[in-house]
Amino acid sequence: MENHTTHPEENVEKNELSIWAALLPVFALIIMLGFNVLVVYGDDALSGSNQFILLLGGAVAAIVGYFNKVKFDTMIDEVAKNIQSTAGAILILLMVGALAGTWLISGIIPTMIYYGLQILNPTIFLAATVVICSVISVATGSSWTTSATVGIALVGIADALGIPLGMTAGAILSGAYFGDKMSPLSDTTNLAPAMAGTDLFTHIRYMAITTVPTIVVTLVIFVIIGLNLDTSGSTDTSSILNAIEASFNITPWLFVVPVLVIFLIVRKTSPLIALLIGTLLGAVAALIFQPEIVLEISGSDELTFVSAYRGIMDAITVDTAIETESAALNDLFASSGMAGMLGTIWLIICAMVFGGIMDAIGALARISKALLNLFDSVFGLFASTVVSCLALNVTASDQYLAIVVPGKMFAKAYKDKGLAPENLSRTLEDSGTVTSVLIPWNTCGAYHSGVLGVPVLSYIGYSFFNYLSPFMTLLFAAFRIKIKELGNSANTRTA
């Protein structure tokens, strides 16, 4: 499909770009993104300006293609094919937003948080913090929300117990980013497979191969640290638990819905079908267990078919917030529904424009060829992906771009090497998503350090999960452990 048989005069082999011409749009994109994030917009860059910068990067690529005699129609055709290839991912993102809305108003997410907080124990506070933040981040799909809500509470508890705040922040972020990686509700977890060319649940299953060992090692380290710390006082979370109970009907029966969705995922049900069923079951659970909340969202005085319909549909499609007695929890119990996914969808479409033009002019093929020559081994390809993600996190200062740009650059190289796309999507998350919080000027590092009140340099040494993840993915690549090949998706190649 990569060969444009209708335009033989534009064959990449005939008019192959120089490596510097192929890299010119990439360098231009990085410079523009760096200026946009570091100088002008900061945390707000993802609201739209970064997306337009990707279009400008595509324009630079188009100019390079023009001088290489690539027709404009050829570039547009490739962009259209690229955008078409992400249709499934875009629909999944919309369904993820819908599921988040019904799981909030049904009390499923609050129930997960309620029981997660009860495992807190002063003797293993740090390890318990990792587990709690993992549960909450998996439930919400957001490391940022986890940090800004329960994370703040845990920092306060640690301060009262005399536990160093750097250790606590490291434990919070280790758990938060584990959940952010593994949750189907996470935007980065949806973005990575969309860039690499695989599906959501294949990506999550394959990512668990490196992620689970990493979080286990992280927990062991925190248990050892915790057992050698002297703590005083108690971990009083009663006010938070009471606030949750006052706002929601908390019951273990609500776990039936996520268990059924997990069962569907394990049975390899289509992601769209599994998410749709999860959304509908969440809506039913909301009507059974939280009718008062549905009524409140609908703005009606009486629960009728119309008011119930409106309450559910509002939760699925637009912003929904559940007020509690604890102001700290209000951000946690908020969802933007399908509308909240539009920013990520916008980013994907603009990335496809950049990637499509780069593909049409032969730049991605030229870069891939250079990379395969430079890194002849499978390990070299994985290592170059990790380094590229880290470089983008440092220069572009945004985890989304650290996934998008390397994802488009390396997709062909992995394919040419005979590697399944989930190898790339896993590596993007193992190195792009989790390391963003370790860089002070990255949007993630600046956000979390500001929210938790702990400088990046204070927690960087204790964010074990975040910096062990890239090493774990390289370790698996070095020993050829679970490296899936194209055309052999049922089997994996091991050392």
Image (cartoon, grey):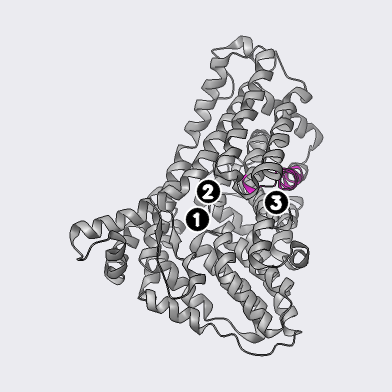
x and y percent of residue 316 in the render? 36, 54
Q: Which residue is labeled 3 in the image?
A: 442
Residue visible at 58% across and 40% down in the picture: 195
- Residue 185, given in percent of the width and then of the height, sits at 49, 56
Q: How far apart are marks 3 and 2 (CA)?
A: 21 Å
Highlighted range, magenta: 382-400
Mark 1 packing: few (<14 Cα in 10 Å), some, or many (20+)? many
Horizontally, residue 417 falls left or right of residue 82, namely right
How far apart, in angstroms, are the residues tagged by discs 3 and 1?
Answer: 24 Å
The reply to whether the C-beta atoms of the residues labelled 1 and 2 are less than 8 Å apart is yes
Front-lying residue, 339 or 388: 339
Rendered residue at 60%/42% (across/down): 421
Q: Residue lying furthest bottom in this view?
A: 233
- At label 3, which amino acid type do we have? Asn
Q: Which residue is drawn at 46% across and 71% down?
A: 112
Q: Any mark on residue 184, and which?
A: 1
Question: Which residue corresponds to the image point at 67% horizontal and 28% vertical from the top-left?
Answer: 364
The question of residue 395 being in magenta is answered with: yes
Count neighbours of disc 2 (C-alpha within 10 A) and say few if under 14, some if 14 to 19, many if 20 or more: many
Q: Which amino acid does label 1 sit on?
A: Pro
Q: Residue 473 location, x and y as percent?
A: 71, 54
The disc, 1 or 2, on the residue closer to the chain's N-terminal end is 1
In front of the other: 376 or 400: 400
* 103 sits left or right of 19 in the view: left
Can you identify the residue that label 2 sits on?
190
Q: Identify residue type, mark 2.
A: Asn
Nearer to us: label 3 or label 2: 3
- Dot placed on the residue nearer the N-terminal end, 3 or 1: 1
